[in-house]
Image: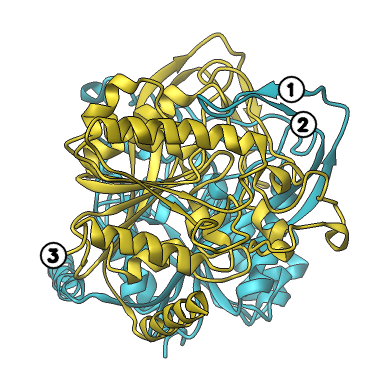
Chain colours: A cyan, B yellow
Amino acid sequence: MRSLFAALSALLVACAAAAQPLQIREIGSLHAGGRVAGVSGLPEQEIVFSPGAPPLRINPNGEFQVEQMYAQYVRLQDPRARYPLILAHGGGLTGVTYETTPDGRPGWQMHFLRAGHDVFVTDAMERGRSGWARFPQILAGEPVFRTMGEGWDLFRIGPAGGWNVDPAQRRAFPESRFPAAAWNQFMMQSVPRWVTTDRQVQAAYDALVQRICPCVVLVHSQGGNFGFTMALNAPDKVMAVIAVEPSGAPPQASEAARVRGIPHLVVWGDNIRGNAFWERIRANVERWQGQIREAGGTADTLDMAAEGVRGNSHMIMMDDNSDDVAARIQAWMERRGLMR
Amino acid sequence: MRSLFAALSALLVACAAAAQPLQIREIGSLHAGGRVAGVSGLPEQEIVFSPGAPPLRINPNGEFQVEQMYAQYVRLQDPRARYPLILAHGGGLTGVTYETTPDGRPGWQMHFLRAGHDVFVTDAMERGRSGWARFPQILAGEPVFRTMGEGWDLFRIGPAGGWNVDPAQRRAFPESRFPAAAWNQFMMQSVPRWVTTDRQVQAAYDALVQRICPCVVLVHSQGGNFGFTMALNAPDKVMAVIAVEPSGAPPQASEAARVRGIPHLVVWGDNIRGNAFWERIRANVERWQGQIREAGGTADTLDMAAEGVRGNSHMIMMDDNSDDVAARIQAWMERRGLMR
């Protein structure tokens, strides 16, 4: 009953806000970080780039701008947040994670704009609009492509073996809040990823922080460790870290003292207990949270299942209660003094 | 003198508009088109996706969502344009083409929002946030990577051989309007591209048109032929085509009658005369414009050099007079009845 009332209240607030136009100062983008890299020794090619265009002889050797990352920003006329909010996605995805949900509802980008934040939606190095470089010459190894079925289990939409290419045959958890009927639409958001590029991905995030912060960083999944490390690498610039279902955390306990002045919040969905893979990930993150607290810092947790809300998946920003989860994160930011 | 006055007037209008916040109804995105494709016969892999996470055994075979395209939209509270405006980029680039210019000025996305259009900024199939698929299994052939030097000549920033890895040694055309000091920043916007995927790129654009139009389509470079063909494939949905430095055009004269009800505008920069590559491209586009006119249609031209404005490059939406060029395109849309 209490959660029904809370949900209805949140809906009313959202409807009232949605009726008002957003007052926007500027929409734009930038690329940060990266370097110039040379490639040599490859043979010339003759290429017709467009039908009707004459062929061009192309020398594929030369210099390339590589390892930068993309950030798109929406600046409000009068932000209520003290700092811009950087949204960073997880593995095999892009900033689209935070845009319209696969079933067509406003995403967290819009939610946090309406809540008064300047919002930067980012693509990690080698994903989306960041571009990717020739491999193996510049990016080591090969990219990994996620099958449609892999995420169903890994993202805790349904039980192992619950996915089927036929949508009518897919089995989600009965309480699942992910819009499972829009799974194919969600998979359109997938992009290839490397698993050898953590150093460059981190370097680009760190360059972005130097360019646009002070700011608050909200990261998801693979972005978790990058977000925790952004704070370690720029404790004067990162004002808070919100790690949503983070899949990793920094290994060195001795470093935690550097971020004791930076409030951390970790957000978890449901169906982690009993899932050995996710239990190990969560234990590792809780170890890091404990180390921050031991160093005198703040490392809070928002555990939706512990709050009595069932069925949240790994892709919690797309679940049917995504606005409710965002509102709880917003309330934490209010409590932690991040709003004017 | 007259063009100085026009430029100053445009600047004053732009400054007055820039002082007012944009009234935005919604910011969001979608993926359109695509299909489910299967891959089989590849060996299993064991992968550690994030530091500290346990390794996962991954079967790379299965189904993939492929060949979709991404569109990001900004909807105004009260658009003055009759139809949304789709912005589509050229080869080796993404929708970032229309965002902030490499030297940090507002791009055409902002310009056309301020002029009263709902704006869709799109990434072509296999570029940017559209994602790309395993090759050669799904995408035929190999991707092409553009060197930093190739574009300098091809995009008419400077003479052949004018590029140098050392920014101080680069030679631009004396009258060049491209912000050449920001060339490295521009090259960060590059993404790999295939030259074998025109069919799938077109199919995704056509799916996007079916999903979100009626609309006006503004395309650039490689996007030119896709835009002309979007109109051919959906003459009831595409209300106008604006082709900026298009690199191709449909081959069949007999088809021009299908688009005779759709106003077309072709926009050219400077330094095309005497450049054999660009003269051939332009002649092919003028052939298509002539065929539209012979069929009783409208195919106008905005030739900046003929208007007495020197130095516009192929990347005209990034040149130092980008707002002036956009204002001339806007004036054409007003004349063609596309605004309320």
Is residue A33 toward the left or the right of residue B255 in the image?
A: right
Q: For mark 1, does the 10 Å Cα neighbourhood hold few (<14), some (14 to 19), or many (20 or more) residues?
A: few
Q: Which residue is mark 1?
A: A45
Mark 1 and mark 3: span between their CA atoms?
Answer: 64 Å
Q: For mark 3, does the 10 Å Cα neighbourhood hold few (<14), some (14 to 19), or many (20 or more) residues?
A: few
Sequence order check, earlier mark of 2 and 1: 1
Quadrant of the snapshot with the C terminus of chain A: bottom left
Up/down of A18 relative to A245, above or below: below
Res A28 seen here: no
Up/down of B253 relative to B263, above or below: above
Are circles 2 and 1 on residues that touch, CB within 8 Å? yes
Q: Which residue is mark 3?
A: A4
Mark 1, mark 3: which one is toward the viewer?
1
Up/down of A324 relative to B253, above or below: below
Res A270 seen here: yes
Mark 2 and mark 1: span between their CA atoms?
Answer: 7 Å
In the foreground, B259 or A33:
B259
Q: Amino acid at mark 1?
A: Gln
> What residue is shown at x 15% (from left), y 75% (from top)?
A16
Q: Amino acid at mark 2?
A: Pro
Q: For mark 2, does the 10 Å Cα neighbourhood hold few (<14), some (14 to 19), or many (20 or more) residues?
A: some
Percent across and percent down for residue A153 are 41, 33
Q: Which residue is mark 2?
A: A60
Mark 2 belongs to chain = A
> What residue is shown at x 69% (from left), y 45% (from top)?
B151
